[in-house]
Amino acid sequence: MITMKPKIGIILFPPPRSEQKIFSVPSDYISGILDAGGMPIGIPISQDVNRCASYIEIIDGLLVPGGEDVSPRLYGEDPVPQVNCSNYDKDVFEYQLIRLAVEKGIPIFGICRGHQIVNTVLGGTLIQDIPSQTESKVCHVQANELRSERTHSVRCQSDSLLGGLLGENIHVNSFHHQAVKKIAPDLKATAWASDGIVEGMESEDGNIWTVQWHPENLYRRYPVFKNLFVHLIEKSEKM
């Protein structure tokens, strides 16, 4: 008898700053889902947001991956000069997909850009550029070649979902210049960098959780980060 694995939707997108007519996602996201026991289902972005409803009908969970900047248009601002790489069609498609997933109660795991756009969809805003808009002295953009290298510290709230999955004090990798500013009403911050930047959020029911770092690049070297993917599979099995 074949056991059906939870189907995890993962958004596919054109490479930033590229005219190539391809849709892709870094393979570590796929591996994270597979190694945790799920079945990845690719969802290519489209200008036709009506397709989102059809995808929502066939998935049990949703992973929102990293990528380029979230357009400030989504939260009513013009971009600062440092925000020069965004894809509004992608933003709008993801916005609709996330909104429908929330309405249906589908578990959502957001990573980096996913952390930021989930917050935006639910009514939050973003710091558009950490170096120019905050007084942070923490490096949040490490060398891209060192994807599995942990750099700065993160403190997780001990009685939170993230604290239970990862522990209270961890170190993470970091590849972002934007960050959560106003937290959406349906989310709460449960992980922070030492400079106060919000590194993790979750919903009260544990059905949505997001992180600012990239656990898909860390979990083979540091197995504790696999727990984030395992939780997605376990939550999705109940759908």
Image (spheres, rainbow, N blue to C red):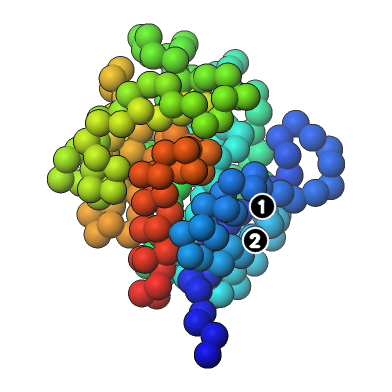
Identified at 73% across, 44% down, the residue is 14
Identified at 80% across, 49% down, the residue is 22
Return the x and y of residue 53 as percentages of the image width and height. Answer: 56, 70
Placement of 148 over or under 40, stated as above or below: above
Q: Amino acid at mark 2?
A: Gly
Quarter of the rendering containing residue 51: bottom right
- Residue 184 is at least partly visible in this image: no
Looking at the image, the residue that sits furthest to the left is 159
Q: Which residue is mark 1?
A: 12
User: Mark 1–mark 2 contact, CB under 8 Å?
Assistant: yes
In the image, 94: left or right of 42?
A: left
Q: Amino acid at mark 1?
A: Leu
Identified at 59% across, 46% down, the residue is 28
Q: Nearer the viewer, residue 229 or 84?
A: 229
Q: CA distance from mark 1 to mark 2?
A: 6 Å
Number of residues whose C-alpha sits closer than 10 Å to that of mark 1, classed few (under 14), some (14–19) or many (20 or more): many
- Tag 2 or tag 1, which sits nearer the N-term? 1
In the image, 157: left or right of 46?
A: left
Looking at the image, the residue that sits furthest to the bottom is 1
In the image, 158: left or right of 230?
A: left
- Per the rendering, the mark at residue 74 is none
Identified at 64% across, 60% down, the residue is 43
Return the x and y of residue 100 as percentages of the image width and height. Answer: 47, 64
- Residue 218 is at least partly visible in this image: yes
Return the x and y of residue 104 as percentages of the image width and height. Answer: 41, 70
Return the x and y of residue 89 as percentages of the image width and height. Answer: 66, 46
Quarter of the rendering containing residue 102: bottom left
Placement of 124 over or under 141, stated as above or below: below
Q: Nearer the viewer, residue 209 or 232?
A: 232
- Per the rendering, the mark at residue 42 is 2
Instruction: Tell me the quarter of the image containing the C terminus.
Output: bottom left
Q: Nearer the viewer, residue 167 or 155?
A: 167
